[in-house]
């Protein structure tokens, strides 16, 4: 017959740990590697994940934005009457419309994704609701 192992008691009252009990728990976590220091965490932020492919110049966000900006300039030149100063929003709308072959639901979903990325979650939900209703119609 084996004796049951009891887990060590680190905190007398888990609902109300003392500062000393918390400090001791942090020290144990640092010692066993289950916790890292703020400095170690900050050093890891922004570092590529192990095994992740190396960043390619084409994946660079600035390169992507520059490429899209150049395409928007072409759309402005080719899609609007001479003398009209189209906005980036108008040109992007035409790009989305043509890319999604004039599919309004797809255009709304793309716009919703942009809103979500910009942290306009309420507006994203409204646009997705419109897209849902359009799909049902």
Image (tube, helix red, strand yellow):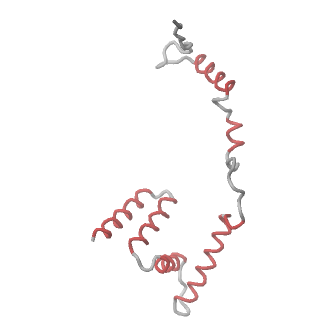
Residue placed furthest toward the front: 1
Residue 94 location (% of width, % of height): 49, 80
Above/below status of 124 relative to 104: above
Depth check, front residue: 60 or 66: 60
Above/below status of 71 relative to 80: above
| Left or right placement of residue 51 versus residue 8 in this view | right
Q: Quadrant of the C terminus?
A: bottom left
Q: Residue at image x 46%, y 20%?
A: 15
| Left or right placement of residue 135 versus residue 24 in this view | left
Above/below status of 24 relative to 122: above
| Left or right placement of residue 134 versus residue 21 in this view | left
Image-quadrant location for residue 133: bottom left
Q: Residue at image x 43%, y 66%?
A: 109
Q: Residue at image x 67%, y 66%?
A: 62
Depth check, front residue: 120 or 64: 64
Residue 124 location (% of width, % of height): 42, 61
């Amino acid at each position: 017959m084996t004796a049951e192992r009891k887990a060590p008691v680190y905190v007398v009252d888990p609902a109300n740990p003392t500062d000393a009990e918390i400090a001791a728990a942090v020290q144990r976590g640092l010692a066993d590697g289950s916790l890292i220091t703020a400095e170690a965490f900050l050093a890891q932020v922004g570092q590529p994940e192990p095994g992740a492919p190396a960043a390619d110049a084409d994946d660079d966000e600035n390169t992507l934005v520059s490429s899209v900006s150049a395409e928007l300039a072409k759309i402005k030149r080719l899609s609007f009457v001479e003398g009209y100063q189209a906005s980036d929003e108008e040109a992007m709308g035409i790009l989305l419309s043509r890319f999604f072959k004039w599919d309004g639901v797809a255009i709304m979903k793309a716009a919703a994704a942009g809103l979500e990325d910009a942290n306009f979650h309420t507006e994203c939900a409204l646009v997705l609701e419109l897209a849902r209703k359009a799909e049902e119609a």
